[in-house]
Amino acid sequence: MKILEVYKDVHPFVRGGIERYIHDLSLFLAENGHDVEVLIAGDSSDGADIEMSGFKVRTTPCICRVMSNPICPELIDTLREIPADLVHFHVPLPSAVLSWMMTGRRTPYIVTYHSDIVRQAAFLPLYGPFLRKFLHRASAVITTSPVYAKTSVFLSRLKNISVIPIGSDLNRFKPSDSMQTGDYVLFVGRFRKYKGIHVLLKTWKHFPDRRLIMVGGGPLLPDILKAVRKDKLNIEIIHDPDDERLVQLYQGAKCFVLPSTLRSEAFGIVQTEAMACGTPVISTSIQTGVPWVNEDGVSGIVVQPDSPDALAEAIRRMDDSTIRESLSRGALDRAKLLFDSPVLLSKIEALMLKVISLNNNG
């Protein structure tokens, strides 16, 4: 089966949850004998093909990005011409949705719906009807949690929904052989508004003697550095650690925090990575898959969003060794039960094969 994956970026060129997921899925499919190509936005020069380990990445020229959405003048022709038995779109990505609908191509396609459009919500009255039609025509629409399937206005009425969560590689993300726990709290992710960075910074005014390690980078980095200097916050920032170092950071943390505030945080892949390492998670009760991934009282603590006081209290509760050890065991058990990556990737492959079979027989 020849599969075309479509998104704006892919790991390792961009380090992010969705980008890593697409990389891992593409590698998994390639190792199972499928011919996989990933189409992403490149720079403004001519498109290029990049050989990865097991699959190919094709870039299409991008003249600019508007609110993270790449503007690619050649995307319609590229989508029309690339041979594929099945196309797999990852959204939100308005440029790809509109371009595909303009190709007139009848190749079967599926969609993984990672998140509602939040930053560009002002454009939904114009774009929304096209997105609804695009999702309705798909052979299948994958959502990563049952919560998002129910709470998204674009998913709740669809009949072609499949719920397949995003997992982590439990052979890579796993507890340390050492029983010792570090003295720090950990955050991993892009430094963006929807992550609740402002809440985290306010919370850390409560903890002059407690260390916070923030792994990542992004638009809010200058704000973080300014707050660290101004308020003398006990925060260490680590940029782009390698995979081995990242796992070590998860393993050594007293707990992991994800104080997200907006629907842009649809799932929180980093939660599954922390849980797989046996690290309890503190996340928020936003109406997405985030509190479904991290079950309150089982794998961690779920708090009210936008509340530095609630977040601070949850962090203090992790000082109780009995509570932390119980949540640590629960986190690992939940990761093994629900978020084992090869199991979940196999479900996507099975769905793809079913779509191809039905299309051929139809």
Image (tube, grey):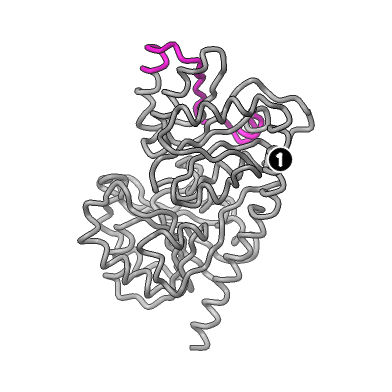
Q: Residue at x 36, y 29 (%)?
A: 220
Answer above or below: position of 286 versus 244: below
Dot 1 amino acid type? Lys
Q: What x and y, as percent, mark residue 201? A: 43, 24
Answer above or below: position of 353 versus 220: below
Q: Residue at x 22, y 54 (%)?
A: 123
Q: What x and y, as percent, mark residue 165? A: 56, 57
Location of residue 357 by image quarter: bottom right
Q: Nearer the viewer, residue 159 or 190?
A: 159
Instruction: Verify whether residue 240 appears in magenta.
Output: yes
**Side of 305 where 64 appears, left or right:** left
Q: What x and y, as percent, mark residue 67? A: 28, 45
- Please state the total of marks drawn on the protein image: 1
Q: Nearer the viewer, residue 35 or 269?
A: 269
Q: Nearer the viewer, residue 206 or 293?
A: 206
Residue found farthest to the bottom: 362
Q: Residue at x 39, y 26 (%)?
A: 221
Q: What x and y, as percent, mark residue 33? A: 63, 66
Label 1's element?
loop
Location of residue 195 by image quarter: top left
Q: Which residues are magenta?
A: 226-248
Instruction: Verify whether residue 22 appears in magenta.
Output: no
Q: Nearer the viewer, residue 9 or 118?
A: 118
Disc 1 crowd rating (10 Å Cα; few below 14, some 14-19, many 20+) is many
**Side of 349 where 191 appears, left or right:** left
What residue would you read off at disc 1?
174
> In the rendered image, which quarter contains the N terminus?
bottom right
Q: Residue at x 41, y 76 (%)?
A: 107
